[in-house]
Amino acid sequence: MDFDVVISGGGPVGLMLAGELRLGGVDVLVVERRTEIDPTLKAGSINLATGEALYRRGLLERLEHETRQGMAQVKAMLSRAKSAPPPIAGHFGGIMVGLDLVDFADPAFRDAGPAANLQLVGQQTVEKVLAEHATGLGAVVRRGAEVTGFEADDDGVTVFVGGDRVRAGWLVGCDGGRSLVRKLAGFDFPGTDPEITGRQALADLDGADALGLGWHRTSTGVYVHGPLPGRILTVEFDGPPADRTSPVTVAELQDSIRRVSGVDVTVRSIRSATRFTDNARQATTYRRGRVLLAGDAAHVHSPFGGQGLNLGIGDAVNLGWKLAATVRGDAPDGLLDTYPVERHPIGEWVLEWTRAQIAAMRPDPHAKALRSVLTDLLATGDGATYLAKKLSGVLHRYPVGSDHDLAGKSAPDFEFTDGSRLADHCRDGRAVLIGARIDDERVRPAPGEVVGRPDLKALIRPDGHVAWAAEDGGTAGLEEAFATWFGTRNPSHRIFA
């Protein structure tokens, strides 16, 4: 084999997956057609679940600096505004939810540690940091190249990269919504057809002060101005764009702004612009033999709610350690098949969430009535807290076969009696065992008891999710949980308190 795994696509999802595989000791080639990071305006923030994943891999400090820079830009723009909007916890189709309404004492908002401070981080920044992370761990990233085809068999995959043939054990398509890997492998990709044309840009605008900041729904569509200077987004419900690939022109963007807002804004120049739509589709499974999908290759949807990047990073973190164990040969039977079992329902939720937002944004009387009901609900403490929990990812729970309150959830950033925190022990991609010991090098023992929960015993998977937990003083069920997720490579291993 030339490589254990070839990843088609070197965006944030492909690079996150490459890093996870390298932590598992796997040889990885990432093939990316772009020579540089795509500068097009994309996701501008990450949710709590993504922040935790990056924090556990030691990437927090690199991202925090960029967060401070982004917040400084936003604060500067808000300071020039006639009336600054109040802090928000998020939005649903442009219905803003006040931060002060959210009950952060809700048990779902378990201690995330410093990851909770990561919010306003641009997708390009995430991609840059992940590229440095993956290559620093030894992943090979080949830019300016493209996967043009492949042939899969029982023993592996022959991948055609330009004029080269690369032999690998596995191929993962992280190559976006129009994934060639998905198409050639024959994955079913059902869903709903688009009905909008959206345009998002960073532009130099004259007359933009008359637009005001934030989301605005009009009789002809929706527009969003800010929070970054020059950022403008329009949505028109006149069907999908006839052309998704040609550059957005000054005249096109200006006409759209004027049609939707009714304000005679002049676009002097465009720094970055893209079109988007609400095509919502999901592969029926994320694996066909030795070919897998992750990120937009597995699911596409409108950008509203900012879930695309977060969903893809979650795919990569879930898949990485399972595929690495499969490559090494120490995975229990069926481990890799738990990837689509765990991630497909979350992708399905995101598609439904974005479809619902489109329904609430339409410029018609029925949508107006729906927005009125939703606005009332989201103005309550319960409604605001529910939305914040959904958007942050804290409600995601995998079916791990244990009924403890923590089981299947992303683990809190526990503090241990030696002063360290859980994330400090996750950087090498190994599992962490709290309150017990096991003779297995794939598992790192916690350095002491959990502060405030001295009786807690827990097995934390490499992706940070709790595979098993107990607080009754025993380890009943731990050996079974270990066998489920890690197998019994060493039949003589012993688990003891």
Image (spheres, helix red, strand yellow):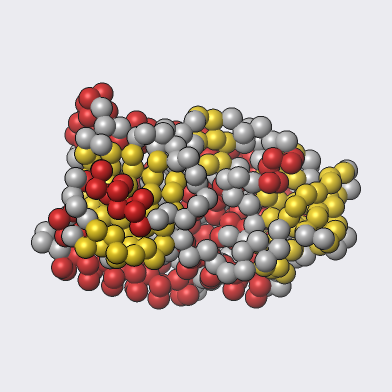
Instruction: Left or right? Give the position of 469 relative to 289.
Output: left
Residue 104 visible somewhere in the drawing: no
> Residue 216, position in %: x, y?
22, 45
Q: Residue at x 18, y 50 (%)?
A: 263
Q: Residue at x 78, y 49 (%)?
A: 149
Q: Nearer the viewer, residue 257 or 486?
A: 257
| Above or below: residue 93 compared with residue 460 | above
Q: Kindly give the residue lying farthest to the left in the view shown.
A: 82
> Residue 41, position in %: x, y?
42, 60
> Residue 81, position in %: x, y?
15, 63
| Above or below: residue 86 compared with residue 422 | above
Quarter placement of the C terminus: bottom right
> Residue 387, position in %: x, y?
33, 42
Residue 177 visible somewhere in the drawing: yes
Instruction: Left or right? Give the position of 211 relative to 174.
Output: left
Q: Residue at x 55, y 67 (%)?
A: 37
Q: Nearer the viewer, residue 131 or 404?
A: 131
Q: Residue 495 sits in which quadrant?
A: bottom right
Q: Nearer the viewer, residue 442 or 191?
A: 191
Q: Residue at x 37, y 63 (%)?
A: 270
Quarter placement of the N terminus: bottom right
Q: Kindly give the residue lying farthest to the front in the view shown.
A: 251
